């Protein structure tokens, strides 16, 4: 049975398309921040961070203040990490990168996907299939033994997005987040972390879309706790 937002998409299609074009025209295009995308001496827990613009740290001034740098500090010195992330990346695009990743092996992969799958209206079934395939390929090709699936943000609160686009994308983001939650619940090697950040202005970057440096700090701390718990199970 279709949800109300899915039913509304067809009659709203012209308006949603116009609002999408308006957002692209109006949006401040922040760059991926400069800085190292790998760290550690090869010892300790080996972590792969794979995903989209938020994984790449858009909204921060440097990688040190972005997700990867703050996560590395939160995890402490006993971690070796590699960041592979790109603005606009969907799950499908990350799948295409698996063969080009460092040989590894990696102990754990942090997967940050869903916003671009949402804006492209990937179906829940397709998103589940592509996330499952990504997990399987990372396990087979790079030896990953544990996965953290970072939840989707509450897009219904993004100040950049006008209504009704904000409502439609918020509903679909929640739908895809439920896919990640269900996928993790069905697998012993996965855990899902809801992106439960306080939604205040200081946690939003100046583009009205990406996390701020304060948000990356909170997110990294939340992730570090989950990653430590997963590491104890490897």
Image (cartoon, rainbow, N blue to C red):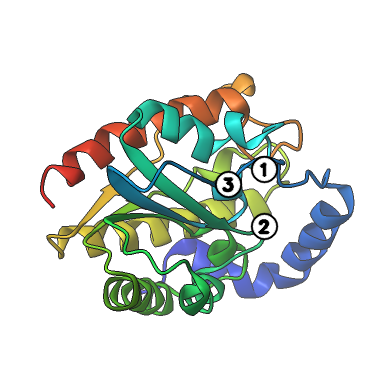
Residue at image mark 2: 87
Q: Residue 168's spot in the image, x, y percent?
A: 57, 57
Q: Are marks 1 and 2 in contact (CB under 8 Å)?
A: yes
Question: Up-down: is 218 above or below 157?
Answer: above
Lower position in the chain sequence, tag 1 or tag 2: 1
Residue at image mark 3: 54
Name the residue located 47 percent from the left edge and 52 percent from the top edge. 82
Lower position in the chain sequence, tag 3 or tag 2: 3
Name the element at disc 2.
Answer: loop
Distance, label 3 to label 1, CA atoms, is 6 Å
Neighbour class for label 2 at 10 Å: few (<14), some, many (≥20)? some
- Which corner quadrant of the image does residue 19 belong to? bottom right
Name the element at disc 1.
Answer: loop
Residue at image mark 1: 58
Q: Which mark is residue 70?
A: none
Which residue is at the front of the view, 101 or 111?
101
Distance, label 1 to label 2, CA atoms, is 8 Å
Q: Residue 127's spot in the image, x, y percent?
A: 42, 73
């Amino acid at each position: 049975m279709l949800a109300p937002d899915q039913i509304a998409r067809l009659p709203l299609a012209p308006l949603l398309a116009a609002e999408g074009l308006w957002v692209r025209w109006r949006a401040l295009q922040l760059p991926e921040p400069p800085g190292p995308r790998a760290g550690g001496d090869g010892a300790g827990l080996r972590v792969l961070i794979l995903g989209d613009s938020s994984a790449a740290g858009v909204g921060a001034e440097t990688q040190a203040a972005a997700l990867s740098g703050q996560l590395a500090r939160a995890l402490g010195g006993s971690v070796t990490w590699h960041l592979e992330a790109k603005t606009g990346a969907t799950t499908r695009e990350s799948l295409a990168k698996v063969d080009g990743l460092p040989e590894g092996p990696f102990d754990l992969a942090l997967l940050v996907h869903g916003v671009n799958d949402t804006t492209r209206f990937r179906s829940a079934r397709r998103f589940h299939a592509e996330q499952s395939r990504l997990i399987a390929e990372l396990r087979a090709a790079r030896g990953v033994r544990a996965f953290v699936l970072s939840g989707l943000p509450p897009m219904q609160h993004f100040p950049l997005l006008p209504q009704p686009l904000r409502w439609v994308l918020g509903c679909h983001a929640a739908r895809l987040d439920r896919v990640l939650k269900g996928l993790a619940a069905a697998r012993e090697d996965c855990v899902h972390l809801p992106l439960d950040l306080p939604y205040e202005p200081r946690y939003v970057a100046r583009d009205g879309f990406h996390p701020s440096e304060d948000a990356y700090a909170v997110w990294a701390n939340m992730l570090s706790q989950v990653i430590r718990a997963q590491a104890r199970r490897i």
